[in-house]
Image (spheres, coloured by chain):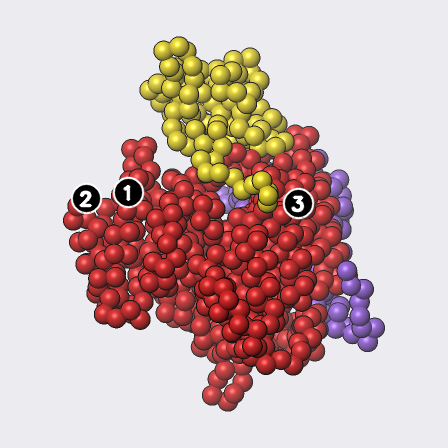
């Protein structure tokens, strides 16, 4: 956990005061909507179909129980008793009133939270691996670096009106859980041949209308240079990124049009000028930030305590959940527990205020008061003693967040789609719900194994459909909802964009198509261990295409 | 257009001269980048302050040989959302060491004052007269900044390490 | 930003209303014949000609203090004179999400 100090606290409080003044000017007519819009967007306030929407940042996906309780409180007091966790480690409130927003912001500020830069053409919320600090395979805790960069880019005077939004992710493990390659800028902690740690720098990833995977422009950047190098990238982008066409304004287009080498050269020229200036980091500065992260006082425990084996024999449900939702922790005797926000019939990523309160209590009891939010729209309790798992499971099941479907076909990533979003072409949530219903049988889900279904309601790709093993994209045809299906996308270290399998299918047929694809996979796979994604890679999409369109 | 300097509404001392118009004697003038580049030698040896209006899609590096002769550079924000001139301003101040007046023109509203001052501007051609009195308050809005910029303020990171002796700043 | 009026000439092929979101809370509103706004589609002024729609839009754009982002939306009129949204998006704006919203625990 990063603990705010007086500087951080002062800044968010001053930001709330500024926003209060801007809202007052808007409500009194001093500001027109055209003038107000960029100001509200810089505080995460959108206008959706039914109401304003507030997007709150959860920097690098780490929450304290106190903060989670505040999320619940705001959901109850100013919204409709629930919130929606997004694919970018944010939470969204869909029914918030403009006139009440300054008060809600002040409540958030009291626990060190804000909506700054969750929208607008600035650097957005920094994201990372939701297992940061606890994953057995990580190089070091990426959140220290994410926090350093977060601070550096917050209310940055130069980079608050860039051509377009700018998303940064920091990764740390061999296994990429932060979807690095689909970010405008990704920094992957790596170790070089001398055993020093630094960053591999990748730029120009992004989904949307023209999807690209980020390209490496610097294989090894020393840690001391990370702020100056980021500054040089942002400065290059701010000056040369396209502003004539909103669809070509992201850095991916600049990198693509210039070519990664030429882009890297521009960055390097700028970087040489500033690298030894004020932005050069020394250990003392980094330690100052690292020192504000508190880590749990773990006990000395053994892995696999006897209670676990007993509980597995006693309850099949526990056994299934343990096998599915619990992962190894870097400290013996502890575990990382994923809380599925994908119950059958629910909206992927939604949590009620009551659930949030209950999870905050469980985090206090079992996880040193800490909760994580992952880009798959699930929550995580990162430090659970293995011997507490049976008790925790019962408690989680009691509040509906222990569905053992993590990484299975019903663990669907879905954007809000046309049920909420003013940019949508088609609905996403009911599609997700129908697919979950079709695969209601968990044995079937397990038989299918790891299978990521990602759904977006329009080409903006908030649901990351391009990198779903099965990607579903809502389009509009003659006023009707249609969906394009892609196969073979991946967001991890082997990031790949999915391949379109054929013409879009109507709303009512999407779940049938997914069932057909699943059935085709079961027939095509060479052995049960061959994952869906590997079968698609081996066979290509052709056999799936045939199966899907044979009868359509 | 109203001009704000040092937090006050002021008269513009400069005459904006069209590209084909003759230069008035001795008065401070602002010329376009095009005219400046074509007539630079003559312009800098003329009597009277010289300003140039520089577009936001041209590298400010081109001005490097002339910076000592320029009293003012006007950078343009064609739209509120077009922030290229923030980078130009910081480069002029921090990299090229320009010490003259840096004027922000175009779509300038009070909500940008804080950013503009931090980027190194000290003259503001505001769109709304009503925004002028808000200047001082807007600029003073944030007592904490997270990054170094052209205004020379210390970032929270540096302030923390300076007060490291005092340790444990108040937590919340 | 160019106003929606400048963006394109208004073409109207059936009955339409002008709709927007209320400034204070973002609620969906429809412009009324008397220049005000209502949350009830029944109370909306219906235009059937380009000129009529244009007039409603002009008034709506002038009312930036009360309503945000006005635009022209199609409606359907039943034989009995009932007004219904003309497409799915408008149906959802009027009636809310098509999915069940989360309920507090224990409900
Ligand atoms: S993908 Fe499109 S529909 Fe879905 S949330 Fe993003 S903008 Fe809205």
Is any atom of residue B153 visible in this view? Answer: no
In 3D space, how far apart are the residues under numbered discs 3 and 1 (Cα atoms)? 38 Å
**Does residue A433 lie above or below A198 as drawn?**
above
Image coordinates for residue A440, horizontal then vertical, percent: 38, 51
In 3D space, how far apart are the residues under numbered discs 2 and 3 (Cα atoms)? 47 Å
Foreground mark, 3 or 1, reads 1
- The circle on residue A188 is none
Is any atom of residue C56 visible in this view? Answer: yes
Q: Which chain letter matches label 3?
A: A
In 3D space, how far apart are the residues under numbered discs 1 and 2 (Cα atoms)? 10 Å
Q: Which chain letter matches label 1?
A: A
In this rendered view, identify the residue nearer to me: C20 or A544.
A544
Residue of label 2: A552
The hue used for chain C is yellow
Residue of label 1: A509
Q: Residue at 67% across / 63% down in the picture?
A: A365
């Amino acid at each position: 956990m990063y603990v705010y100090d007086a500087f951080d606290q002062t800044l968010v409080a001053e930001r709330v005061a500024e926003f209060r003044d801007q809202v007052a000017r808007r409500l009194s007519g001093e500001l027109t909507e055209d003038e107000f819009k960029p100001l509200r967007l810089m505080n995460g306030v959108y206008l959706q179909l039914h109401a304003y929407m507030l997007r709150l940042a959860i920097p690098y996906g780490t929450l304290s129980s106190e903060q989670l309780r505040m999320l619940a409180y705001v959901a109850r007091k100013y919204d409709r008793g629930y919130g929606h966790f997004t694919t970018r480690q944010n939470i969204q409130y869909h029914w918030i009133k403009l006139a009440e927003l300054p008060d809600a912001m002040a409540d958030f500020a009291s626990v060190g939270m804000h909506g700054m830069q969750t929208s607008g053409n600035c650097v957005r919320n920094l994201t990372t691996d939701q297992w940061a600090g606890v994953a057995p395979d990580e190089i070091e805790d990426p959140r220290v670096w994410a926090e350093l960069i977060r601070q550096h880019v917050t209310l940055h005077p130069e980079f608050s009106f860039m051509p377009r939004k700018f998303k940064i992710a920091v990764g740390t493990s061999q296994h990429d859980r932060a979807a690095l390659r689909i970010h405008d800028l990704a920094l992957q902690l790596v170790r070089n041949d001398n055993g020093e740690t630094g960053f591999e720098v990748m730029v120009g990833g992004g989904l949307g209308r023209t999807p690209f995977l980020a390209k490496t422009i610097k294989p090894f950047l020393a840690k001391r240079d990370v702020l100056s190098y980021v500054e040089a990238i942002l400065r290059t982008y701010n000056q040369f990124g396209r502003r004539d066409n909103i669809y070509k304004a992201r850095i991916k287009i600049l990198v693509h049009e210039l070519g990664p080498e030429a882009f890297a050269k521009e960055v390097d020229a700028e970087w040489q000028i500033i690298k030894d200036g004020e932005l050069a980091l020394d250990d003392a500065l980094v330690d100052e930030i690292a020192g504000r992260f508190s880590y749990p006082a773990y006990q000395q425990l053994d892995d696999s305590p006897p209670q676990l084996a007993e509980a597995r024999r006693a309850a099949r449900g526990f056994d299934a959940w343990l096998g599915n939702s619990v992962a190894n922790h870097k400290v013996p005797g502890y575990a990382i527990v994923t809380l599925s926000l994908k119950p059958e019939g629910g909206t992927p990523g939604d949590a009620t205020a009551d659930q949030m309160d209950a999870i905050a209590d469980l985090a206090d009891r079992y996880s040193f008061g800490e909760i994580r939010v992952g880009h798959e729209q699930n929550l995580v309790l990162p430090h659970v003693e293995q011997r507490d798992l049976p008790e925790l499971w019962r408690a989680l099941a009691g509040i509906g967040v222990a569905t053992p479907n993590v990484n299975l076909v019903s663990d669907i990533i879905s954007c809000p789609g046309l049920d909420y979003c003013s940019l949508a072409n088609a609905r996403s949530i009911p599609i997700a719900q129908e697919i979950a219903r079709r695969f209601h049988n968990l044995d079937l889900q397990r038989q299918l194994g790891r299978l990521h279904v990602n759904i977006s309601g329009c080409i903006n790709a908030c649901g990351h459909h391009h990198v779903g093993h099965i990607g579903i994209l809502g389009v509009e045809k003659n006023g009707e909802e249609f969906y394009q299906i892609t196969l073979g996308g991946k967001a991890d270290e082997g990031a790949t964009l999915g391949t379109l399998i054929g013409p879009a299918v109507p709303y009512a047929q999407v779940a049938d198509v997914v069932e057909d694809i699943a059935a085709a996979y079961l027939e095509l796979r060479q052995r049960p261990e061959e994952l869906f994604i590997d079968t698609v890679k081996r066979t290509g999409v052709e056999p799936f295409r045939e199966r899907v369109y044979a009868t359509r | 257009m109203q001009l704000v300097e040092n937090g006050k509404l002021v008269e513009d001392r400069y005459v904006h001269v069209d590209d084909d118009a003759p230069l008035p004697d001795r008065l401070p003038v602002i010329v376009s980048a095009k005219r400046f580049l074509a007539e630079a030698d003559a312009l800098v040896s003329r009597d009277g302050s010289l300003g140039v209006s520089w577009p936001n899609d041209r590298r400010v590096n081109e001005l490097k040989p002339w910076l000592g002769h320029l009293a003012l550079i006007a950078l343009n924000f064609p739209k509120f959302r077009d922030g290229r001139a923030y980078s130009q301003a910081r480069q002029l101040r921090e990299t090229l060491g320009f010490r003259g007046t840096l004027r922000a023109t175009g779509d300038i509203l009070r909500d940008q004052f804080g950013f503009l001052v931090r980027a190194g501007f000290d003259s503001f051609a505001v769109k709304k007269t009503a925004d002028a009195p808000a200047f001082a308050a807007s600029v003073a809005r944030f007592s904490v900044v997270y990054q170094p910029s052209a205004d020379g303020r210390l970032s929270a990171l540096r302030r923390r390490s300076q007060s490291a002796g005092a340790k444990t700043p108040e937590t919340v | 930003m160019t106003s929606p009026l400048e963006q394109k000439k208004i073409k109207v092929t059936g009955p339409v209303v002008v709709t927007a979101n209320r400034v204070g809370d973002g609620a969906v509103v429809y412009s009324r014949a008397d220049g005000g706004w209502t949350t009830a589609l029944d109370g909306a002024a219906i235009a059937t000609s380009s000129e009529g729609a244009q007039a409603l839009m002009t008034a709506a754009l002038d009312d930036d203090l009360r309503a945000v982002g006005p635009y022209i939306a199609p409606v359907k009129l039943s034989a009995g004179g009932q007004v219904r949204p003309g497409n799915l998006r408008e149906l959802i704006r009027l009636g809310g999400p098509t999915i069940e919203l989360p309920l507090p625990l224990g409900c």
